[in-house]
Image (cartoon, rainbow, N blue to C red):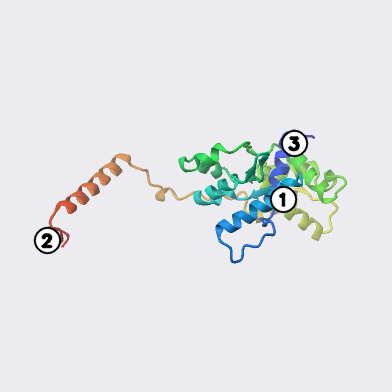
Amino acid sequence: MSCSPARLEQAKLYYCAACSSYSDFGLSVSGKNKSQILAELSKYLVARGSQGLTTVLVVDEAHHLSAEILEEIRLLTNLETARGKLLQILLVGQPELDYKLDSPTLRQLKQRIAHRAQLTPLDISETQGYVEWRLQVAGAKDGRLLFPAETIAAVYRHSKGIPRLINTLCDNALITAYARRLPSVPAAIVDSTAADLRLDVVHLPPADLAVDFDETFARRASKTLLDLFSYLRRAPAGDAEHERS
């Protein structure tokens, strides 16, 4: 089976970005203020640009960053010359990142985004292509010998095609198969691995804890509090103390 090249490339990009550890550019920041650090970073980027090199900053788990930090990242895009930008920035994150970028406070950052891509869950054919690609990168000659069709089906069933879960399932299943000295990974090992990781366990809150939001009641309560606050502000200090007592 084969998968869409574009979709597989998206999955590869996700994997490479997710596995890249954040590291600096080898510049010392000890004893320097923000202006000095930015000046040194700019000098470093100009030097790389003059050599025809592209500098990329990969920010993984970007959905966890505050609006203030994301704004600081936006300011880094101001590092440029007449020939173009000195720093390319790649933000990688969960769907919550989209919500943050859509907020009014980050509209300037949103306007500077040149490309946006969303990796939706892979189908079973794409799952097999993704697993085979990772095995090929790791040195395997034929990934289908390690993960036969029925095993890929089990991986897809438990992961729902989410690359991060595919990675976790396959890595753990490979370790188990290696420990048992098996020539390939059977579907049963994937099933037991998924059970150990509790991938199919979803706990919903008890029904008695669910509380329906009553908008009318909330509006009335808010109005009452505002009226009380307004009264206390108008009342003389002595009357206010008497009222609170």
| Residue at mark 3 to residue at mark 2: CA–CA distance | 77 Å
Residues marked 1 and 3 touching at CB (< 8 Å):
no
Task: Inspect the image, locate mark 1, and give the three-letter code of the amino acid beneath it.
Answer: Ala
Q: At label 3, which amino acid type do we have?
A: Ser
What SS does tag 3 mark?
helix
Image side of residue 66 versus residue 208, left or right: right
Which callout, 3 or 2, points at the residue further toward the start of the chain? Answer: 3
Under circle 2, the secondary element is helix
Quadrant of the image for the N terminus? top right
Residue pointed to by mark 3: 125
Q: Is residue 118 above or below residue 38?
A: above
**Front-most of 184 and 20?**
20
Residue annotated with mark 2: 238
Q: Residues within 10 Å of mark 2 (few under 14, many from 20)?
A: few
Look at the numbered disc 1 and give the secondary structure of its residue.
helix
Task: Kindly tell me whether residue 165 is visible in this rendering.
Answer: no
Q: Residue 187, percent across and down?
A: 75, 48
Q: Is residue 19 visible?
A: yes
Answer with left or right where residue 189 lies relative to residue 244: right
The picture places residue 100, in percent across and down from the top left corner, at 51, 43
